[in-house]
Image (cartoon, rainbow, N blue to C red):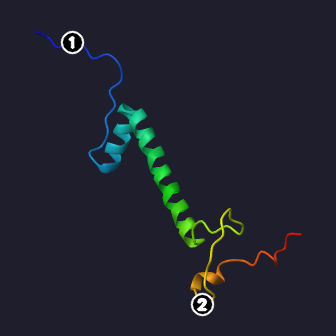
Amino acid sequence: MPYPKEIGYKVKFPNTLMGLFKRGWWEIPEIMGTSCLALVGIGLAIGGMWRYKRENGANPEYKMTYTVVRPDDPRAQLYKNPVHTKYP
């Protein structure tokens, strides 16, 4: 019995890690695209958390509630004096 004739273009990829990556983009572009967007989102989240930690977290100049801090506490240096600000 004869084999059926192949119709279309057959794409071949090398048997390497880059070939696997290219084959993934060729066969399942939706999954590869969303995976790349997920990696970008994870990178942005890590960068945001690093910036949040570097700037000492949620420490705004004006708060809705009072915070009592002893003068010898190291966090006292982080708070600004609301009387002497650059705002009029």
**Location of mark 1 (residue):** 4
The answer to which quarter of the image holds residue 63 is bottom right
Given the image, on which type of amino acid does mark 1 rest?
Answer: Pro
Question: Mark number for residue 72?
Answer: 2
The answer to which quarter of the image holds residue 68 is bottom right
Closer to the N terminus: mark 1 or mark 2? 1
Q: Nearer the viewer, residue 37 or 75?
A: 75
Q: Residue furthest top?
A: 1
- Indicate whether 56 appears above or below 45: below
Given the image, on which type of amino acid does mark 2 rest?
Answer: Asp
Label 1, label 2: how far apart the Cα atoms are:
86 Å
Q: Residue furthest bottom?
A: 72
The answer to which quarter of the image holds residue 15 is top left
Residue at image coords 32%, 27%: 10
Residue at image coords 57%, 72%: 54
Q: Is residue 57 left or right of residue 12?
A: right
Q: Nearer the viewer, residue 36 or 82?
A: 82
Task: Specify few, some or many for label 2: CA neighbours under 10 Å numbering under 14, 14-19, or 20 or more.
Answer: few
